[in-house]
Image (tube, rainbow, N blue to C red):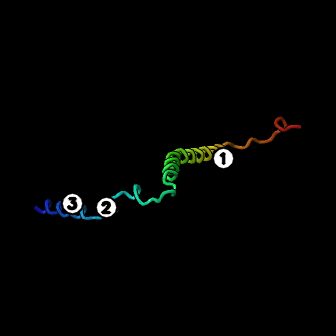
Amino acid sequence: MVGRRLVAVLVAGWALLPPDAQACSVCVGWPEGQGLNGGFYWSALLLTALPFVVVGIIGAWLSRAARLSRSRRTPATPKTASTEKR
């Protein structure tokens, strides 16, 4: 019984709200000339490129860490008379 009352109250409350409150914030409220289409375009472009940028940054960091690790592990070769340039 409580479930039916709750549903009835929610439906009545939603029906009594003004139409502007029921609308999506993206669909209404943009005056003409505000660049809504441009905003959608750039947000989609940035969200599409973001995973590639993150993977690229992580890959560059791992590559640099591996290069530094390799350079620290290799021992320096001692200079001898045969390896020196004259």
Quarter of the image with the C terminus in it: top right
Q: Could you tell me which secondary element the residue under label 3 belongs to?
A: helix
Q: Relative to residue 45, is residue 73 drawn left or right?
A: right
Q: Relative to residue 39, is residue 72 drawn left or right?
A: right
> Whole-percent x and y of residue 59?
57, 44
Q: Closer to the observer: label 1 or label 2? A: 2
Lower sequence index among marks 1 and 2? 2
Question: Quick check: marks 1 and 2 in contact, CB under 8 Å?
Answer: no
| Distance CA(mark 3)–CA(mark 2) | 14 Å
User: On the image, which quarter does residue 30 sit in?
Assistant: bottom left
Q: Residue at x 77, y 42 (%)?
A: 78
In this figure, which residue is indicated by the disc labeled 2?
A: 19
Q: In this orientation, which residue lies closer to the viewer: 57 or 40?
A: 40
In this figure, which residue is indicated by the disc labeled 3?
A: 11
Q: Could you tell me which secondary element the residue under label 1 belongs to?
A: helix
**How many C-alpha atoms fall within 10 Å of the one at disc 2: few (<14), some, or many (≥20)?**
few
Numbered badge on residue 72: 1
| Distance CA(mark 1)–CA(mark 2) | 67 Å
Q: Residue at x 60, y 45 (%)?
A: 60
> Whole-percent x and y of residue 18?
30, 64
Q: Give the amino acid type for the residue marked by disc 3 in the picture.
A: Val
Q: Relative to residue 15, is residue 63 drawn left or right?
A: right
Seen from this angle, which residue lies furthest front? 32
Q: Give the amino acid type for the residue marked by disc 2 in the picture.
A: Pro
Lower sequence index among marks 3 and 1? 3
Q: Residue at x 51, y 48 (%)?
A: 41
